[in-house]
Amino acid sequence: MMAAFIFACSVVLLLQFFISYCRSLIAASARQSLSREVRDVAGIAQSASGEDFARVVQLLQLCPESPEDRAGIQAVGAYFRMLNFVRSTVARVMPSLQAWTEFERAQCAYFAAVALERRIASSRDMFAQQMDA
Amino acid sequence: MLSVTGYILWIAGVLCETGVVVCAIKKGSFRRYLFLNLYMAMSVVMSVGRYEVLSRFGYSSAAYLYFYYYSDAVLTILLYFALISLYALVFGELNASRFVRLGAVVLLAGTAIFSYAVVQQSSARMVTHFVVELSQNLYFVGLVLTYLLWAAILKMRETRAQLVQLVLSLGVYFSLFAATYALRNLYPSMTSVLLSLLQLFGFVLPLAWTYAFWRFSTDDRIVPARLALVPR
């Protein structure tokens, strides 16, 4: 009985912490603006939408991976999949949840675009260092 | 005998834990988050110790079993103090550090007494059972304390990005472990599967902390309103 109670509490709190953790990752990148170049490459005209996420992640995979941002991208990727699940199930009967998932999915796409910007800049630096050497 | 995958995961875990300390030193956050780094450094030391005992006595030996659970209890207590050090950071401006320390010691003693009361019925290997019970209970106490700290962070509109990330990742880690230990109690036949899961979950904290130390400086801020699930 006690174990079942602890299990139920832990799962609920896990969800809460995981969502808040991903939102804190996204919030930290929300203040960074995207360069025109990255907007063009990622196909983000005005503001990012959830539909952009998969494309931006594919572009991210083309860049040399930097281990320090891998954890954040994986966490937000998992959060995006969770949002997709909520959108295709519970949100169908709750319109307010539909709007929330759309907003969050767009934020995930923006986070991925900021990561892409960082990776492109880091690849350029690496290339410049090699040329100097 | 441990499988090749088991060894690879073990080595990867030690490398990740080392990475946290290296990142913290490189980014100048080592002293600020001293207990968190001490916990990670101690995890590396314990892993080396476990390997030594494993190679000398074997995977199924009593020596390895004892060393594993005792070192796990020590690490859990250290992680508990790492969490308390985060409380001290959040409540530092309120000059409440003394009360936080006192409360932490009282709660730790209370958890130890409760764990002892639970296992005192079983006469065989009571000390070992006590150590396992204490670890499990501390994970749940840690989870509840992390949740309270998170609530305080939201209430006080804390904006330090690195601190927020460290607390939230600790919450994810504690809830994963508390849920797995609870499942293990519910379904003892699934112990081997759940132990493998615990090994995987062990990566969560070092990866998230490495990211927090590497990506953010101590001065980086985030908008608190964006953290709450319900807009404030």
Image: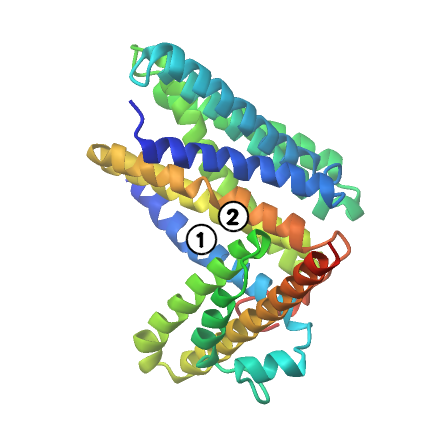
Q: Chain of mark 1?
A: A
Q: Chain of mark 2?
A: B
Q: Secondary structure at mark 1?
A: helix
Give the quadrant of residue B232.
bottom right
Residue B171 numbered mark, or none:
2
* Position of residue B15 in the picture relative to residue B163 (left or right): left
Residue B217 in the image: x percent, y percent?
Answer: 73, 53
- Taking the spot 39% from the left edge, 42% from the top edge, the residue there is B200
Callout 1: 10 Å neighbours few (<14), some, many (20+)?
A: many
**Residue type at numbered disc 1:** Leu
- C-alpha span from label 2 to label 1: 8 Å
Give the quadrant of residue A113.
bottom right
Same-chain status of marks 2 and 1: no
- Taking the spot 19% from the left edge, 33% from the top edge, the residue there is B189
Quarter of the figure that contains the N terminus of chain A: top left
* Position of residue B50 in the picture relative to residue B118 (left or right): right
The residue nearer to you, when weighing B35 against A116, is: A116
In the image, is residue B189 above or below residue A121?
above
Residue pointed to by mark 1: A13
* Position of residue B80 in the picture relative to residue A32 (left or right): left
Which residue lies most toward the bottom here?
A46
Quarter of the figure that contains the C terminus of chain A: bottom right
Residue B168 in the image: x percent, y percent?
Answer: 56, 52
Can see residue B66? Answer: no
Cβ atoms at labels 2 and 1 below 8 Å apart: yes
- Taking the spot 51% from the left edge, 75% from the top edge, the residue there is A109
Give the quadrant of residue A5.
top left
Residue B118 in the image: x percent, y percent?
Answer: 36, 23
